[in-house]
Amino acid sequence: MIKRKIMFIVVCILMTISVLLTSGCGVKKENKDSNKKLVVGEMWKIDSIDPSTSGTLTTEKAMITETLVGVKENFELKPGLATEWKRIDANTWSIVLRQGVKFHDGTPMDGEAVKWSLMRAIAVNPQVQTFTKIKSIEVENDHTLKITTTAPTGDFPASLHYMGASVIAPSSVDKAGKLIKPIGTGPFMLEQFEASTGDMEMAKYKDYWGTPAKLEKLEIRPLPDPNTRALALEKGEIDFTCDPPYNELERLGKEKGLKVELNPTARTYIVEMNLKKEPFNDVRVRKALSYAIDRESITKHVLFGCGTPAKGPFMPGMAWTNENLKGYPYSPGKAKLLLEEAGWKDTDGDGIIDKNGQPLKITLMTYPQRPGLPPMAQALQDQFKQAGIDLKIEIMENSAMSQVASTGKWDMKMSAFATAMIPTPSYHLQVLYYSENNKLIGYNNAKVDQLIDECVAVDDQQKKYELSKQVQQILEDEVPVLPIAYYGVAAVMNSKIENFVFNPTAHDYMLTTEVGIKE
C-alpha cells in the first residue's frame, strides 16, 4: 500500500515536471513566433475596414487589398493587378488583368470579379466614380476589361491607383450586400477585426502571387493620440508607428532599441479659408495673411525639422511642381500695408485691427491626430497677433471639423492635405480648386477650371505638367489657400525592424512584404 502511494506521488511529480517543461517550450515557441509578428500603432481611429472608403488602411497598411495600377517612388505608374492598359479612343480603355492571382478565399481574380468590385466601390463611395469617371465595364474575357468613361481622361490609369478602387472578392459581402470582411489579393489576409477597439489582426497569405511576406503576422492598433503612440513604443507594446510628438523625436532617437527616420512625402500643411465671407473674399487680406506667416520659424521650432517651408501646393522634386513660384516670404510690413489697403486699421489702439467698428477676429479649426497641427495653430496665433489679428483656436476631431465647415459657419481650418492620392498633376488641383468640387471654400475661377479640364483630358505627360504649373501660378497670385509647410513623416520603430523603406507616395506609411524583424 505504501509502495503504491509512493509510486503515485512519483507519477504525479513526473507529470507536473512534464507539464512545466511543455509549458516552457510553448513560451519559447511563442517568443520565436513573436519575431515574425509586427505590431503597428496606427494614428487614426479605425471605424471601417471597407476598402472602398478605407482603402489606404486595407492596402498600404494592412496589405489585405491591392489596386489595379501601382506607382513607383517617383510617382510613375507601374503594373499592379493589371499588367497592361491601353486607350482605345477618347472615352474607352482596355485593361489586361494579371493571370494566376487568387483571392484569399481561393477564387480567381478574373474579369467578372474585378467588374463587380469596381461597380460596388462606385456605389459605396461616389469619389471612386468622380476620380475614375467610369461609365460602364464590359468583360471581354477572363483577363480583359473594356471600360468606358463619362468624359475623356488621360488620368484614367492613374485613377485605378486610388485606394478606394482596390479590389475585393464578391464573397466579401453577404447576400444583402453588407461587407463581412475584405477578402483581397494582398500578401496578408484579415483574421480578426474588433469593431469596438478597431484592432486588426492579419496573417500571411501563403498563396500570394507576388513576393512572399517575411512576417507571419501583422497587427494594427489604433492609437490616435501622438503621446500615447510614443509611450506604447517605449514600453514595447508596439513595434512601429508614425508621427509621435515632434518635440520628442530627438529623445526617442536616443532611446536604446529605437530608431527614428524623417522622410518627405506628398502632403502639404494648408489653411483653407471661407472665401464666401469677409475678410477672406478680399485677395489683399489673403495675401496679407500669407505674408504674416513665418514659415521658416514654424518648420524649425514647431515641426523640429520634420517639414520644410511651402511655396505652393506641391513639394519640390515632383515632376509637375512649379519650381518658379516665389511664395510669400515672411514680411509683417507687407502684411500690415495690405491690410490697411483693404481698410483694416487699429483705430482704437487696442492692438487689434478693425474695419467699420468690427475687430478682425478669426477662428481657426484643426485636429490633433497629426502632432504638428495644434502647435502650428498656436504659432499662427502668435504671428497673426503681430499683424493685429485676433486668432482663436479650436481643436476637434477631423470629422467634427468637416461637419462644422459643412454648415458654412466657419472661418479657417488647417489640415495636412495629401497631394498625390492619385499620382497625377491634376488630382490635387481638381479636388481642392475646381469650382464644382470646392464649394466648401468657395473658390471659383473659370480659367483654372479650363486648365484643369485640359490637364485631365490630355495624354502627353509634358503637356499635363505645363498645364498644372500654369494653375499653380494662378493659385499663387490669388491665394485661395495658405500653404504653410511640406509634410515630413516621422517613422519611429523598434531597431530590430529591418527592410522598412519609406515610400514618398504613401499617404501615411506603406508596409511591404520585405519588412521583417531580426531574430
Image (spheres, rainbow, N blue to C red):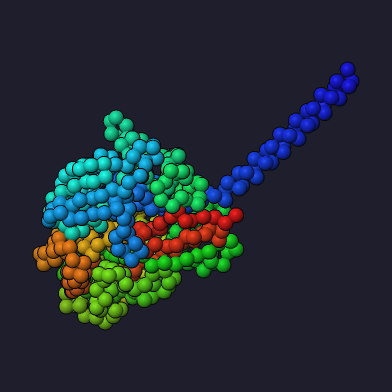
Q: Position of residue 229 (x, y in %)?
A: 48, 55
> Which part of the image, by quadrant, shows the N terminus?
top right
Identity of the residue furthest to the bottom in this view: 333
> Which part of the image, by quadrant, shows the C terminus?
bottom right
Identity of the residue furthest to the right in this view: 2
Q: Position of residue 262 (x, y in %)?
A: 44, 67
Q: Which residue is located at x 53 percent, y 66 percent?
A: 253
Q: Which residue is located at x 84 percent, y 24 percent?
A: 7
Q: In front: 327, or 491?
A: 491
283 displayed left or right of 504? left
Q: Which residue is located at x 40 percent, y 47 percent?
A: 209
Answer whether residue 78 is visible to the viewer in this image.
yes
Q: Quadrant of residue 439?
A: bottom left
127 displayed left or right of 31? left
State whether residue 123 is above or below residue 227: above
State whether residue 21 is above or below residue 417: above
Q: Quadrant of residue 105?
A: top left
Question: How many circles with numbers are drawn on the protein?
Answer: 0
Answer whether residue 471 is visible to the viewer in this image.
no
Q: In front: 127, or 405?
A: 127
Q: Position of residue 472 (x, y in %)?
A: 21, 70
Q: Which residue is located at x 45 percent, y 39 percent?
A: 192
Q: In front: 516, or 309?
A: 516
Q: Position of residue 427 (x, y in %)?
A: 23, 60
